[in-house]
Each structure stands twice: as C-alpha cells, then as structure tokens.
Amino acid sequence: MSAPFGKVLVANRGEIALRVVRACQELGVRSVAVYSDADAQAPHVREADEAVHIGPSPSSESYLQGGRIVEAAKRVGAEAVHPGYGFLSERAWFARAVRDAGLVFVGPPAEAIEAMGSKTAARQLAIKAGTPVVPGTTEPLRDAAEAIATAETFGYPVLLKAAAGGGGKGMRVVREPAEMAPSLAAAQREAKNAFGDDAVYVEKFVEGPRHVEIQVLGDQHGTMLHLGERECSVQRRHQKMIEEAPSVAVDPELRARMGAAAVAAARAAGYVNAGTCEFLLDRSGAFYFLEMNTRIQVEHPVTELVTGIDLVQWQLRIAAGERLPFAQEEIVPRGWAIECRITSEDASNGFLPSTGRVSYLHLPSGPGVRWDGGIEAGSEIGLFYDPMLAKLIVHGRDRAQAIERMHRALRELTVEGIDTSRDFHLSVMEHDEFRRGDISIQWLEQRLPEIVSAPASGEERRVAAIAAALVAERDRGTRRTGSAAPNGTTRVVEGDAWRRAAWREGLRSQ
C-alpha cells in the first residue's frame, strides 16, 4: 500500500506529536515537527524528519499561531496538517485555513467542528438524530431568573456548563435557587476567560453517573463505525486521570445501543475521521449524550489495544481518501486496557504543578506495557504547557490482569528531578472500590483524601522490596561492572536497581 501523503506537518508538541510522528514513520510518510523556544530540544523535534521553529515559549505565541503554522506547512512542502489534540485541534477556523491553503486537515471538516463545537448546538443535533440527551436547555441562558425557571422544570440539583468549553471550565453544580445567581456569574466569567465566550446553559445534574465515551471512525465514502466504549469516570475537577476499555458497566447489548447513538450523532454532523461522543451512564443503564470531541482523544491508546486498530494511522489514511476496510460486527473488544496519565503534579500537595529538570528516567517494560511519552532524561519541565508528561498504558487478558500489570509497570517507573502523579496512580490501583469497578464521576473526589494520603504500597511490600534490594546489592558487591556515563564519570550499572528500588520506597541512596 502506498503512503497516504508524502509529508505531514504535526501542529502540536509533546507525546501526541511524537505519536503522530511514529505513525507517519510506519506509513512511509515524512513528518515535520513545529516547536517553540522551550521545546527546541524536545524528543518530537528530534524524531521528526524536519522541524520548524514557530515562536517563543508561551503557546499563545507559538502553538496557537495558526497562520504561522499554515505558512510553515506550505514552506516545507507538506501536503497535510495533523493537529493532535488540544491547541488548534478543535478550532474550525484553523481547519478552514488549512483547507483554504490547499492542504489537507487531518480531522473532520470545519463544518463538522462548528456543528459540534458548541455544546448547545451539539445537543440540538443529537436531539434531531434521536440520541438521548440530559434534560436541559438547547440555548444559552439569558440571566439567573431564566436559569431558575428552567431548573424548576426538572428539579435540583442542576449543572451550569459553558457552551463553548470543556475540561471542567465554566461548570458549576447548583443545588438550590439561592445559589443560581452567583454560580451563573462565576460560570460565565470562567467561560469567558477560558474560551472567549460567556454562553452558559443548564442541564439536569445526574447523581453518581459514569463517564463513558464512544470512539467513532468515519471515512469520506459514507462508512461510519463505532469502536466501542472507554470508561473515563476517574476524574478530578472534571479532568480525566485514568481511562480504560472496555467498561465494567457496559455489556454487548448496551455497547451496541450506545454505539448506534454515537454513530447517529456523528452522521448528523456530517462527521469524517476520528471523533468521540461522550455520554453519562446512570446506574439504571440509561445514557445521555454530553458532547462530541472532534479530534483524537488523549485516551485513544486503550481503544487501539483492545481493537487492534491504529487510530492515528487511520486518521491519516482517511484524510487521504482511503476507505475503511472494517465491518461493524468485526469490531469487538479483546482483553482489557488501562491508561494512567503521568503528570508533573504533586498529588499529596493539592496537585500543585512541579517544575524542574528530569534528572533520571527509567521506563517500565515487559508484556503488555506501552509508554506514550514526550519526555526523556534532561527534559526541562516548565509552566508553559499542560502538566501531562506521558501516558502509561497496559493491556491484559481481563481487567484483573490489566490492573496488576499497571501496578507492576507503575512500580517500575522512575522519574527523578520533579514530582509526578505516579504514586497517586499506584494508590488508585490498590483501592478496593477501583478494583471492583465500583466507580463514578464523583468517586475520586470523594476518595481523594484517603488515596493521596495512602502509602504507595503496603508496609510489608516496602520492607520486602528494600530487603531484597539490599541482599542483591550485597551479593553483587564484588561483581560490579562499570560503564562510562555521559559526563565521563563511571556509573555502577548493577547499583541502579537498588537506587531505583530505594527511591520508589521513599528512600535515597547516596
């Protein structure tokens, strides 16, 4: 099969830029990275075939400069632009600018982005398509009086949501009429600051639901398929922390119904390429459309692992006009996949961002382990961008094995020089309710104090790990070999196992 394009510019940074570069390499496509001052030495810049500097470190002066990125693509002779996620990926004007420049936007048409870009417009489309939605308004609220009158039609609590946003920005739960006016003002102010649009709508607040999303994939020839669900209920302040596929709450019959609803909503928007429909799933099995993300998702690897379909490669192939060769009945989940987002945050201190230099990095490996990262030893972590450093993903024959595999992989992971979310994820993997799959969107917020205060491992495992490392170090004492470190000093190779074990258990070996 011939390469879909000769050259693709990747309009992003970090792990997703590197992910797209790797997809291009496997397809025989030359890749072009873009980078800011802060990212001049980043892995995605080095791994791409070419790289173009696009501005200073702040994203507003570099990665959000759509015109500059389009000019760079034309200058290097790229045929297509892949936006990744975040930044300009869901900006209809950028997709249109790429198209108007005679290039291919690797994503949905600008018109589909516009149709699904506003939550209120997306709700209207979903209703027309017969997709169930949470009771609420389809037009932005005018004032608090209208919000109160609307809320009384389906009862409290209600949820105020920014029409143009996501990621928890511009969202407020209102439990009684007296809270409405200040909550609406706060939601509008936050929405304006985050998205440049203060439009807010109201919907019924569903107590204790799961966040379950459906991956869709459509080509330019009318084929639209769903690739099953992802469970994304482990969230903090509406930000996903851990994702998995499939979901313990979804059986084949429910999967088919939710998938059909997602496909109907995507068709109603004239959608092409990869996208995700997000739903709330309540305890009775009823589900409600929330919104559509018109891009590749952060958590796409779990779907790739259980379906065997490379979503990023198919994004490129679809953009080049290829037909999807799959039939819906052929797509069934095989095994179980879990993803943990590794961020530069100190979970024990309110998830405060951590900055500094990654002085040492040891990556997990072994059966069923995947690392999608954008960092390496020596990487400088600042405050210019999102704190997500990488994604650790595992695949197992079932959920129990996937949890144990993730636990093992997290214990192998070592990042020195900055604080990360690694120990937080270890605590979640050890939590009985998570292991049972007894979770909801509110679960993490309710359990967070005990999770962040719990030790990364039980005391017995702590003692055993340190004792084993000490014995191994003693036994190797006369058999050490040295290797030249980059600075010309000698590094004791066998001693690294002890150093990593001690660091993982909260000690430092000098």
Image: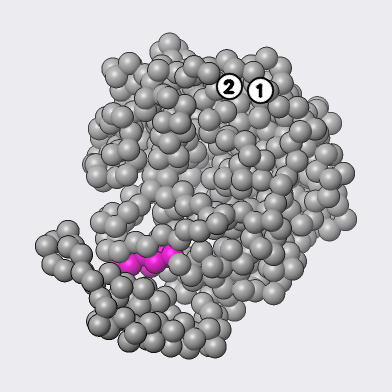
Which residues lie in the magenta part? 413-420
Circle 1 SS class: loop
Q: Between residues 275 and 404, which one lies in front from this camera angle?
A: 404
Q: Is residue 93 above or below residue 305?
A: above
Q: Count numbered badges in the picture.
A: 2
Question: In the image, is residue 97 part of the stretch drawn in magenta?
Answer: no
Q: Which quadrant of the structure image shows residue 42?
A: top left
Location of mark 2 (residue): 318
- The percent coordinates of residue 229 (x first, y second) are 72, 45
- Left or right: residue 352 versus residue 259 is left
Location of mark 1 (residue): 324
Distance from Cα at disc 1 to Cα at disc 2: 8 Å
- The percent coordinates of residue 103 (x first, y second) are 43, 15
Q: Residues within 10 Å of mark 2 (few under 14, many from 20)?
A: many
- The percent coordinates of residue 299 (x first, y second) are 57, 47
Which residue is pictured at 69% across the width and 69% down the height?
435
Q: Between residues 370 and 88, which one lies in front from this camera angle?
A: 370
